[in-house]
Image (cartoon, helix red, strand yellow):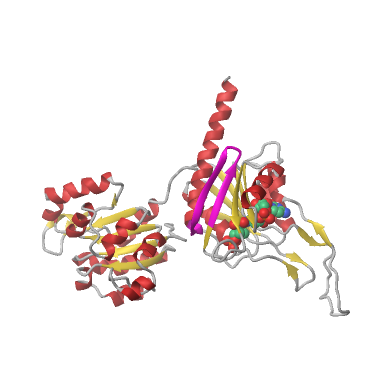
Amino acid sequence: MVSLSNKRVLLGVTGGIAAYKSAELARRLRDAGAEVRVVMTRGAQEFITPLTMQAVSGHPVHLHLLDADAEAGMGHIKLARWADVVLIAPASANFLSRLAQGRAEDLLTTVCLAAAAPLAVAPAMNQQMWVNAATQANLVILRRRGVHVLGPAEGDQACGDFGPGRMLEPLELVAQTAQLFASGKLAGLNVMVTAGPTWEAIDPVRGITNRSSGRMGYAVAEAAAEAGAIVTLISGPTALPDPQRVETIRVISAQDMHDAVHARIDNIDIFIGVAAVADYRPAYVTAEKIKKSGEHMSLELVRNPDILASVAALTRRPFTVGFAAETNDLEANARQKLESKRLDLVAANRIGAPGIGFESHDNSLLVIDRTGSTDFPTQSKAKLARALIQLIAEKLHAAKQRSKTKSRA
Ligand code: PMT
């Protein structure tokens, strides 16, 4: 099944009869798991109302560039940064021309210029307009700049003509948009990710846990699957649904997580420990609920196994990546973890700062290995996970290359 889960799709609608299909497209994108925001040009509003697009996308539609209220909410730069992909469907001949010229005269062209995310266009126009040399020249420019051109299809046209220029059907556009995220960089590799908190029981109703939502780990698992890996996710208790295309094993405590990891570690090529595992658990779990008694109560705690360190210590160890959640001295503490746990890579994140770390939708990472560090600034956990997976793939391939050269020498 096609998945766009965790993806933020900015759907641009321009003026053309195919705009009526954009409503269906927005629904299908959401069915595939995407969050959708819509920007409409003036021309698009002649064919379909913003109200319809608001209803199907579930969010107010963005229409104007120079609107003080809109800019105070999600302005054009924020919108551009928000998007994981910008999909213009339908893309009229006029819009393609304006895009090729790099114009910034309305909200949609400006967002396209400001977005670093991949840009895809689904052209829709009369067949003669499509084959016109001007349109084809614009497409050459756009393709050269890395714009993905989806379609068009060939067939009967609203004007009565037959030929190329029909917008691809919504389901086909969803499939091709999902394909834009598939890098294939980890094709055929087995990846295991731990995520979420652990729950260390005190009695049948109480326990020790932490604020990890699982979002970062689930995003890493999905990004690995997108990159072509066969992914096993070992998750502590979270409220998140199982990610698509990922085998998800649910566990409760650190000891459960340790056991689940080691039961499946044999063929794993890459292990990524994102879980916030409790370092200690209560020494005893009472069978009955503990009753209130004196003014004070002490809880004896014992150490939990360190899952990450135990994986890194295996004789045939996978490429082992840890996370480090730090309130201070981010780099120094992360380097200390890299060495003490014998890791290949550590992704360090600051916790305790507003808007990043535990529970939030965004995060930032300082990724460290023995050769240096890479800084990933604040962005959605989904985007960050994709960047991290890309870096892991590069580091792994470089490590493999080094060991090949060594064994030849
Ligand atoms: O789940 P979210 O709400 O999205 O939040 C994401 C996150 C902040 C939890 C995540 O980005 C993160 O930082 N995860 C690691 C949290 C943590 O426990 O860090 P640590 O510095 O205590 O542990 C270092 C590493 O050792 C981690 O990879 C951890 O999984 C691992 N560990 C720790 C203890 C233990 N007993 N076993 C382990 O495997």
Image location (x, y in percent) of residue 35: 42, 65
Image location (x, y in percent) of residue 195: 61, 57
Task: Magenta stretch: give its range.
Answer: 364-382
The residue at the point 84 percent across, 67 percent down is: 299
Q: Quadrant of residue 216?
A: bottom right
Depicted 291 relative to depicted 212: above or below: below
From this viewpoint, which residue is outermost toward the right?
294
Q: Does the magenta stretch include residue 106?
A: no
Depicted 191 relative to depicted 32: above or below: above
Q: Does the magenta stretch include residue 371?
A: yes
Depicted 335 relative to depicted 292: above or below: above
Image location (x, y in percent) of residue 59: 38, 73
Quadrant housing the N terminus: bottom left
**185 relative position to 297: left or right:** left
Count of numbered tags:
0
Q: Main secondary structure of the magenta part?
A: strand
The residue at the point 71 percent across, 64 percent down is: 199
The residue at the point 24 percent across, 54 percent down is: 102
**Can the viewer see residue 237 in this picture?**
yes
Image location (x, y in percent) of residue 85: 37, 57
Quadrant for ligand 1 reads: bottom right
Depicted 191 relative to depicted 349: above or below: above
